[in-house]
Image: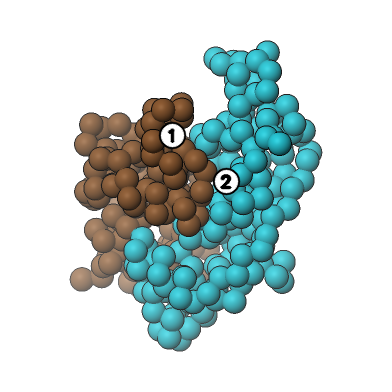
Chain colours: A cyan, B brown
């Protein structure tokens, strides 16, 4: 059953996970999109980086979080894409061995003024690992289709 | 020659590009990290999506922009990773055939108070295609190593 704008409520909390992150995947993503040495060279990163380990590209952490939320929510929801993000923070890097999950809280909902068949939902996403270390926190605003217009 | 914190100035504008985006790459990224139908099904996206075309995952646009900036700047700069992003916007989707480039403006620079060997730089990134359509705009804050401490 498809989840429309009307099926969401401010204050709802949704949990999605988990995704196991490997060294190979960190290096593969970074070699393609973010080839900085602390993302692509495991040995050097462990010895020389201020992260003390191979760190995933921050965009990789975002992509993994997206996959968890799509599999757990958007696969059955009338999401129409995000307009943008406020306050994105990477307080700790994702490292090999992390098992990531995402907590989504619905902060604010409003009908679109220009198009009553759509609603705008502002969410807080928190990505943590198995030790509850926060890897990513951000506030996307996502467009949803409404079941009923107006 | 490595670009350190001291080599940057507020107001500097840097340009990087271009990156040609194909339908195959949009689908490949989305199938792995953002498998929503308007990112993975070209025909259906062109017929049914409000984007009127296959739209790249917003995270894919971020990743491509990162690649351009790494190749043009961080490959020779003492960047130590980003702390976070303010005001990330995707005003238009990236679509097949887009040729993306990035304009980076240095908005604000300050020495770290806790560690004088590092500086924090707030940048504005604007990603546009060959028709000057804006695909992504965001303000990351990036840590750089300083050449001289204090």
Q: In the displayed structure, would residue B57 be above or below residue A91?
A: above
Q: Which mark is residue B28?
A: none
Q: Nearer the viewer, residue A27 or B17?
A: A27
Query: What quarter of the picture does the C terminus of chain B occupy?
Result: bottom left
Q: Quadrant of residue B142?
A: bottom left
Q: Quadrant of residue B76?
A: bottom left
Q: Is residue B48 left or right of residue A88?
A: left
Q: Is residue B146 visible?
A: no
SS of the residue at dot 1?
A: helix
Q: Residue at x 27, y 40 (%)?
A: B98
Measured Cα–Cα span from mark 2 to mark 1: 33 Å
Query: What quarter of the picture does the N terminus of chain B occupy?
Result: bottom left
Q: Is residue A142 left or right of residue B93?
A: right
Q: Residue at x 34, y 34 (%)?
A: B134
Q: How many numbered discs sit on the rendered protein?
A: 2
Q: Residue at x 69, y 55 (%)?
A: A16
Q: Is residue B78 left or right of residue A121?
A: left
Q: Which mark is residue B44?
A: 1
Q: On what subunit does the disc labeled 2 rest?
A: A
Q: Position of residue A71 (x, y in %)?
A: 62, 51
Q: Badge 1, how many Cα within 10 Å: few under 14, some, many 20+?
A: some
Q: Is residue B96 visible?
A: yes
Q: On what subunit does the disc labeled 1 rest?
A: B
Q: Nearer the viewer, mark 2 or mark 1?
A: 1
Q: Are marks 2 and 1 on the same chain?
A: no
Residues under numbered marks 2 and 1 in contact, where contact means CB atoms less than 8 Å apart: no
Q: Report the residue marked by disc 2.
A: A87
Q: Position of residue A82 (x, y in %)?
A: 53, 37
Q: Position of residue A94 (x, y in %)?
A: 55, 68
Q: Nearer the viewer, residue A104 or B70?
A: A104
SS of the residue at dot 2?
A: strand
């Amino acid at each position: 059953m498809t989840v429309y704008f009307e099926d969401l409520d401010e204050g709802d909390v949704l949990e999605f996970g988990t995704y196991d992150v490997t060294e190979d995947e960190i290096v593969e993503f970074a070699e393609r999109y973010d080839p900085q040495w602390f993302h692509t060279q495991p040995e050097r990163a462990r010895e020389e980086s201020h992260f003390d380990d191979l760190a995933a590209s921050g965009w990789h952490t975002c992509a993994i979080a997206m996959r968890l939320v799509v599999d757990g929510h958007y696969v059955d929801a009338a999401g129409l894409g995000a307009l943008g993000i406020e306050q994105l923070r990477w307080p700790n890097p994702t490292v090999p061995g992390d098992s990531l999950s995402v907590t989504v809280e619905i902060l604010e909902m409003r009908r679109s003024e220009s198009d009553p068949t759509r609603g705008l939902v502002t969410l807080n996403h928190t990505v943590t690992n198995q030790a509850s270390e926060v890897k990513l926190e951000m506030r996307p605003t996502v467009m949803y289709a409404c079941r009923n217009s107006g």
